Amino acid sequence: MAVATAGSEGLDCSPRGENGSVVRVVDENTIQFADRRGNNRLDTLRNIVSDNRIALLFLVPGIGETMRINGRASISVSSDLLETFTIDGKSPKTVVEVKVDRAYFQCSKALVRSGLWDADNQMGPNDVPSAGQMLEATAADDFDALEYDRTSERRNKDQLW
């Protein structure tokens, strides 16, 4: 899913994912998701503290329709709750709880037009600049794109949870 928030420093939209369901349905008006380790910018959490509005967009590979949820978010650090989101022995630092104001399906036309789930339309790693190349192009100092890209897969695996 994509998580969109707004705060004093502007807007943020970032991806979230799990192996399986990315959210837990608590009741008909409440969902929760683990805020797992990422790039440590904490934009989503900082925004929720200053403005609790949140929007979620769910994309399911192979499914054309998307679900959208708009609501109000809060952050929990309850050890009991964090423990219920433990994966491979690692608990998240926080859990985001969303009180749903509105939930609805989005028309599938944009995904159909884009061919997003069509394997023939998917790009290969050499079709676009790598993350290292993009970071190198925007870095103010020396940045080793090759080293960044070389260690990316291992870094992601080691820091997944």
Image (cartoon, rainbow, N blue to C red):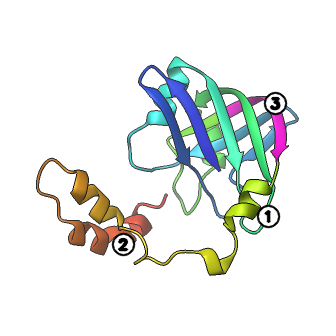
Q: Amino acid at mark 3?
A: Arg
Circles 3 and 2: CB atoms closer than 8 Å: no
> Which residue is drawn at the image coordinates 55% and 63% (left, top)?
88
Where is residue 41 shown, x and y percent of the image? 38, 40
Q: Amino acid at mark 1?
A: Ile
- What residue would you read off at disc 1? 63
Residue nearest the viewer, comparing 72 with 103: 103
Q: Residues within 10 Å of mark 3 (few under 14, many from 20)?
A: few
> Which residue is drawn at the image coordinates 45% and 26% (left, top)?
10
- Give the side of residue 146 with respect to residue 78, left or right: left
> Which residue is drawn at the image coordinates 72% and 59% (left, top)?
111
> What whole-number distance in Å separates the C-alpha atoms at marks 1 and 2?
30 Å
- Mark 3 or mark 2, earlier in chain: 3
Where is residue 40 shown, x and y percent of the image? 38, 44
Q: Residues within 10 Å of mark 1 (few under 14, many from 20)?
A: few
- What residue would you read off at disc 3? 102
